[in-house]
Amino acid sequence: MHISITKLIISRWAEELAALTGKDAGTIVKRGLSDHDFPKQTVQVECADESRITFRDALLLRRPEQGEMAVISRHGASVELRDLGTRVNILPQQSGSVL
């Protein structure tokens, strides 16, 4: 059975996603997220080694006590990272903008 990385990350972060979206965590695990769950914002992550990742229409989730973070994009791109020395910028998207 094949499970996508995004589904795995959504499952691992269901409680945080429930808090952000107002949906039940079990429903999120079962049905996933809808387009309406994603804000019109760009999340830019810069790691300690100066690597950069940019996600459009994305949610940023953090667990500071565990030093973990996740970014989930409406477009299916998702990543979990160690939240150590990581800088994050959240930028509103303007209609018609391309990054």
Image (cartoon, grey):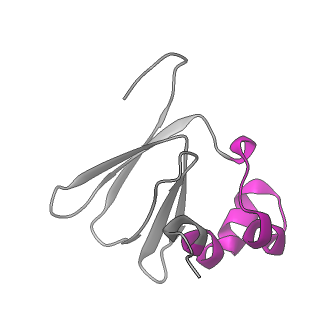
**Quadrant housing residue 14:** bottom right
| Vertical placement of residue 44 versus 81, above or below | above
Foreground: 16 or 38?
38
Q: Does the magenta stretch include residue 30?
A: yes
Q: In the drawing, does residue 98 fall left or right of residue 76?
A: left
The structure residue drawn at horizontal position 16% and vertical position 56%, both measured from the top left corner, is 50
**Quadrant housing residue 9:** bottom right
Q: Does the magenta stretch include residue 20?
A: yes
* Stretch of the chain drawn in magenta: 8-37
Q: Work out which residue is located at the far front of the displayed protein and give it.
A: 1
Q: In the drawing, does residue 16 fall left or right of residue 95?
A: right
Foreground: 6 or 80?
6
Q: In the drawing, does residue 28 fall left or right of residue 49?
A: right
| Vertical placement of residue 80 versus 22, above or below | below
For the C terminus, the quadrant is top left
| Vertical placement of residue 3 versus 72, above or below | below
Foreground: 89 or 76?
76
| Vertical placement of residue 77 versus 25, above or below | above
The structure residue drawn at horizontal position 55% and vertical position 17%, both measured from the top left corner, is 95
**In the rendering, at what x and y percent does residue 76 appear?**
53, 52
**In the rendering, at what x and y percent does residue 8 appear?**
57, 75
The structure residue drawn at horizontal position 84% and vertical position 68%, both measured from the top left corner, is 24
**In the rendering, at what x and y percent does residue 60 appear?**
52, 56
